[in-house]
Image (cartoon, coloured by chain):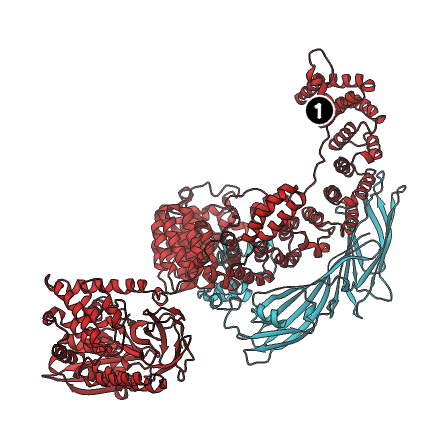
Chain colours: A cyan, B red
Amino acid sequence: QDYFGVCSEVMIKDNVVVVYEVLEEMLDNGFPLATESNILKELIKPPTILRTVVNTITGSTNVGDQLPTGQLSVVPWRRTGVKYTNNEAYFDVIEEIDAIIDKSGSTITAEIQGVIDACVKLTGMPDLTLSFMNPRLLDDVSFHPCVRFKRWESERILSFIPPDGNFRLLSYHVSAQNLVAIPVYVKHNISFRDSSSLGRFEITVGPKQTMGKTVEGVMVTSQMPKGVLNMTLTPSQGTHIFDPVTKLLSWDVGKINPQKLPSLKGSVSLQAGTSKPDENPTINLQFKIQQLAISGLKVNRLDMYGEKYKPFKGIKYMTKAGKFQVRT
Amino acid sequence: MTLTSVPASQPAASRLHPAAMAASPAYGEEKGGSSSLGEPEYGHDPASGGIFSSDYKRHDDLKEMLDSNKDSLKLEAMKRIVAMIARGKNASDLFPAVVKNVACKNIEVKKLVYVYLVRYAEEQQDLALLSISTFQRGLKDPNQLIRASALRVLSSIRVPIIVPIMMLAIKEAASDMSPYVRKTAAHAIPKLYSLDSDQKDQLIEVIEKLLADKTTLVAGSVVMAFEEVCPERIDLIHKNYRKLCNLLIDVEEWGQVVIINMLTRYARTQFLSPNQNESLLEESAEKVFYGSEEEDAKDTKAEAASLAKRKPYVMDPDHRLLLRNTKPLLQSRNAAVVMAVAQLYFHLAPKAEVGVIAKALVRLLRSHSEVQYVVLQNVATMSIKRRGMFEPYLKSFYIRSTDPTQIKILKLEVLTNLANETNISTILREFQTYIRSMDKDFVAATIQAIGRCATNIGKVRDTCLNGLVQLLSNRDELVVAESVVVIKKLLQMQPAQHSEIIKHMAKLTDNIQVPMARASILWLIGEYCEHVPKIAPDVLRKMAKSFTNEEDIVKLQVINLAAKLYLTNSKQSKLLTQYVLNLAKYDQNYDIRDRARFIRQLIVPTEKSGALNKYAKKLFLAQKPAPILESSFKDRDHFQLGSLSHLLNAKAVGYQELPDWPDEAPDPSVRNVEVPEWTKCTSREKRKEKVEKPFYSDSEGESGPTESADSEPESVSEESGSSGSSSSSSSDSEEEEEEEEEEEGSREQSEDKEDEEEKRTKRKKEGSRKAALGSMGSPSEEEEEEEEGVKKSKKKKASQGRKDHAETSSEEASASESSSSGSDSGSEVEAKQRKPPSSRAGPKEISLLDLDDFTPPPPQPVLSSSVISTSLVTDLEGLTLTDTSLAPALLSPAFGAVRTYELLHRMAGEGLSVEYCFSRRPFPGDPHMVAVQIQISNNTDAEVKSLRVSEPKPLSGMRIQEFPEIECLAPGDTASVVMGIDFCDSTQAANFQLCTHTRHFYVSIQPPVGELMAPVFMSENEFKKEQGKLMGMSEITEKLTLPEKCRSDHTIVQQVTLAANVGRVPCGADNVYRFVAKTVTSGSLVLITLERREGAAAQLTVNSEKMVIGTMLVKDIIQALAQ
């Protein structure tokens, strides 16, 4: 992925040679050899348009002829000799809420899974420390190998020499189950009538405990029972699609305006002759809230040692819905 | 290009290349021009269909491109060939053309050729051999990357003929400088092994070597190779166990997985089970609970015994180390690592500690569904054994409608395993929602899960049963059928109360079509026909009606039902039964026919069948035990968790059984990493063995032939005599020399004032020692003096043989030795009692006997012989290595030139006497230290305990490596230890305290300048080159006159090497002697040149960066030579 951006069939076909080269470096007789993308990039340079042009002109190759020093050094994840004119380090704290909400709207289970993704473009060998305001929130953590585990154990500080480029620094789990604030609610009224081949369908989505932030990118999907033939619905906002083959209803809501709650109403036409389906569809919800970490996790400060320059630092918070289900 | 005339559909691979050539002879020519013209066209998309549609003819131009001398063309061709391989097309006919390019300079071309070779080499073995020499060249390339890839491809080529070459290459690469190449070597091992398993023994050797490697890069790969080749050789791990544990966290992820799995097996064989106490306690508790009184009395004794035996379980520190070092890896981002650690903890950790893995495993549930699947399988197994572990995470196993069915079922399994009385209500509520799911397989599994919960937890059985009965009215047939089956199982446990349910189910027979469910209902009715006497015959009637249309399994149950009814209620059902049996008699299925016949004979009373008939009722209506619903994961834990076998619940190829805990702990000391032997062994025997052997061989080899047969007994007598003499003379002043007298005086002084302050005596001793040193500097002179003295004193009787030429050298040493050491030791008494083991060693021993009570190495022949031998060695080395050894290689000094110095006099030391000498061996562990061998003899009549060095007060930069504490020294015993001192290339004394359990003695070791260096090897040319660099200030020249007896080559060399630890440089000129050494701490060169002029005149030149050392050395050498 680091090589081609997207991993698609066409992409692999186009770069079959590079794929071969990369795979050859990665595996030896079926045993993994080097899987760190930073090292692979040094061994075999990823194809870019610029490089292709250069290669055709100069006849050079995109195979590195030097063993990357990283492989042998103490920091196998970072290549040496990194240089940037703009030194910047960005951290994204992304939290996902996994939740199951039952029919009546009460939470059955909810947990927060978070990750800190980093994009570090710093010259040389910087040594970073990242500290949190409230590290106790983190219940279960898993680190990128670069993080010094001892310091985390003793001081609850992330201390690391970052790899170059994009990487996942940390993923964590916030367990305190009662503390999870569910930022949205769904009101639903779905019913099928036995006699007629029509059912009623009504969903309203509203914000709840969002700490004043707006809920964006809301998307509602629901797998309808097999007996459903078609749906005639009118949304108050956004667009909806019902696929009669897969029976998948999806409603792209967009932003939730607390004054005017978005709703989707209409009727469901069922296959004639069959009895009403006894199960109700579950509703899967997706949403995004910018500038908010729902668990309340906050990064306190980021310090850099080992290099002289002053880097540009940035931290972004975001909350997303993970596996967010509402049972009906 | 121009090839569209060939139909694209023709299979490219089936055509032979020459045929294609012949088909279009003109084609090649055309190609010649177009290949260069058309080059951009190749470039735009090597994989597009257009090129491949007719590629079999393009092989020509590919060939041509490969033969061209342009790298870009070759590259293009190779890219297209690789693309062909990727598409599954056969490109093997290009083999010769491709192989030629293996030597190509361009790395990318090379890489692609490698890819091609690995793919096709097995098919075309002969041709592949052409490339071997290139690889061999590649193995010597200075670029480690090329070395590694050459080895990788070489080992990937599966050509049996090259096995020896591969073996050689692997061996070589295993000792490569670059860890990357060593890693590749480790990878190559299993490849070679799979190609030729006869190489196993050799490969194990390589593995053993690589296991000792300290680089993290190598560790993972070599353990992998170990697992592939020789997993049974667990003994190879012992020495490396601790290292592996400590390195683990730094090893790359995949290596971690392999190592952890290997260590799990290792720990299972090497440590005791941490849970044995608990299991035993449980057992005994059970026994007490169930067992009868008498048994108890007997058992408790045995148990108590076994408990007592087992109770003091202390975890092996190495076991603990493993657990401690793997724990952080639970935080790894790699799921495989987490899983490996989890299984390690599950299999190895004490019960109380296993819990830590739960959190990590639950975290893994967030990742891809494949990972989820594997993790859940393992969680399912674990949750059976250790339910408590996952209970806090119950909610994480709740099922989402979006989960794949496989995952759902596994989660269900886990939930069921976790169910207990406290959480059952929530779990059941969850199950209720699941039952309404759209996924019918999942619903069926849920119903079974409910059944299991009901059987396991008695409290909720009724609730579950009611719920299941409600399900019977479900519209989905599958759900109903499943519930019927489960209800049947539940009812079997307590049939009496549930006749209502049975009635209800009887009614269902009209609706339910699923055969399994129908069969279950029929069986239930038959079994409990007494509870439902009215309905049962009716059901049978209905079934008899539809008998012919039923499934086999239902038919069998109908027959069963009929038989049971006939027995219980023959009045109503006799005819019906007859009818059913008749129908069954003509059934298509022989099973059913047989059954019918059997039952007829059994139940229908005839004249013949008397005996069985009576028991028919018993047979059919016997109490049947209720089935136990249990998890399918119950018996899975005998497979190692996380293994493929566990996943499949069947033994997979290559699976290694996880061994059981041993009953007795194997010796933990096998994991101790050995320190080179001679520092460790304080026991005499070992040392003697070690030291003596080479000497004997040396001295025998050298002086044996020169010695006449009759001289031997002589020397024996001489030895005994002289040993006696030396011992007797020890009390009073033995020699006339002033130095000795001085020393003697000091001893007397100290004798007088025994409790005098140590420092003073020490100072005095120092003085006396210095004097002794001076005397030693001129042993040759001294020897004569001494000989005279010996003659005069008449105490030494026999020494006719001394003049013997063969022994002069030995005399010298003995003389010097005795002169230097005669003053100090009081252990002669013991020496007297000991007869030296060999006559040859005898005369030499005299000199040293007073040092120690055992027979130490005879120094003299060593000195002489080793001087010769070292110079011989250097000569030889000079012959072979002169052009290669640019950097001077450190020579190990071939002898322990033993000049002993007193550290603590026995008077001052209250009976404890300590001597030291510079063994001239490199100090193990630290090359910058000078090894000082210390001999401690206990002359008191009490044990000396905890003898150790304390409070070293080194001057700035000086470091002291103490010798290990000597716990106890018996009276009359002697111990020898080695300590290391880094003198920082200065002759400052190293001060420290020598402590016993009662006293402290302040002592100091002052090194002669000659001991601050170690000999190195150098050729004459190098020597001159180095000398050229060290002119001017760093050169010290002194003129001297050589005394009479010091003019022979032999003596000069001997005196110089005695004065300083230097190596001789092979030298062309006759009258020039060159020596070279390096200072121990800073490694700066010390070059010594001694030039002999006419007559006695000579000139000594010392070149060294360290001027102080140079000046002192000049002094010392001149003194040595002048006396």
Residue displayed at 36% across by 84% down: B755
Question: Can residue B77 be seen from the camera position used here?
Answer: no
Residue displayed at 82% across by 33% down: B502
In the figure, residue B869 lies in which quadrant?
bottom left
The kind of residue tagged 1 is: Leu
Q: Secondary structure at mark 1?
A: helix
Which residue lies most toward the right here?
A195
Q: Position of residue B1087 (x, y in %)?
A: 25, 80
Residue B1033, above or below A171 = below
Q: How many marks?
A: 1
Tell me if B678 is positioned left or right of B555 in this view: left
Q: Position of residue B386 (x, y in %)?
A: 65, 51
Q: Which residue is mark 1?
A: B619
Tell me if A164 is positioned left or right of B437 in this view: left
Q: Chain of mark 1?
A: B
Residue B525, above or below B965 = above
**In this view of the protein, which residue sits in the foreground, B35 or B1013?**
B1013
Question: Can residue B143 be seen from the camera position used here?
Answer: yes
Q: Position of residue B375 (x, y in %)?
A: 63, 52
**In this view of the protein, which residue sits in the foreground, B936 or B794?**
B794
Which residue lies most toward the bottom here?
B1033
State which quarter of the image contains the C terminus of chain B. bottom left
Residue displayed at 81% across by 34% down: B496
